[in-house]
Image: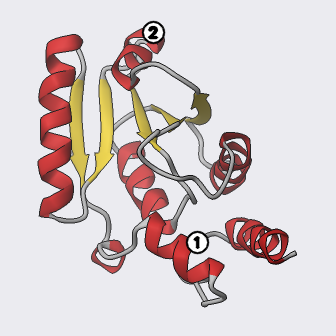
Amino acid sequence: MKQKAIYPGTFDPFTNGHLDVLERALNIFEEVIVVIAENSQKRALFTAKEREIMTKEVTCDYRGVSVEVLHNGLVVDYARQVGARAIVRGVRQVKDFEYEFQMSLLNRQLYPEVTTVFLMPNVKYTYVASSIIKEVGMLGGDVSKFVHPCVLEMMHQKREEQSR
């Protein structure tokens, strides 16, 4: 049986830290679906469609990766629907772990067959959060070390749109 995992997140924008976690997941799983989820608690800079486009562009050369948008519903239900055996979560710091630990326990109650796998990114990405990259980039700061060139271009376009 092919081992399948999902890697959910808002990915607003998709950073090199996200890519690092995805690469680590591909060392474990044959197939990883990057699931772009809507989060009512976060104010997104990019639409779900824009995030899908950028994520597909960043991951297009990776075998075993697909990108989907989850417009509503629970991530754990999506995992069940696609037959995923694992939910991959990137954990950069203790604060991330506390939240993710609670979610994994709840998900285990909802879908016992799925396992949450916590992966830590390379140390150079431990302080890279989409929210920080988004803020710095939209204020004109250089975030080119932290995002793929296509993401950087989309951020430049978004900044120009907002300045009109």
Query: Residue 121, how many percent across, how many down?
Result: 31, 64
Which residue in the structure is indicated by mark 1?
A: 147
**Total residue callouts:** 2
Q: Residue at x 15, y 52 (%)?
A: 97
Left or right, residue 60 beside residue 40: right
- Taking depth in this image into account, of 5 and 71 the one nearest to the observer is 71
Front residue of this view, candidates 98 and 124: 98
Furthest residue to the front? 164
Q: Earlier in the sequence, mark 2 or mark 1?
A: 2
Q: Give the answer, above or below, for where 160 lies relative to 109.
A: below
Q: Secondary structure at mark 2?
A: helix
Residue drawn at x 46%, y 19% is 73
The residue located at (63%, 50%) in the rendering is 59
Q: Which residue is mark 2?
A: 81
Where the C terminus falls, by quadrant? Answer: bottom right
Identity of the amino acid at label 1?
Val
Residue 112 visible, this angle: no
| Numbered mark located on residue 74 in the image | none
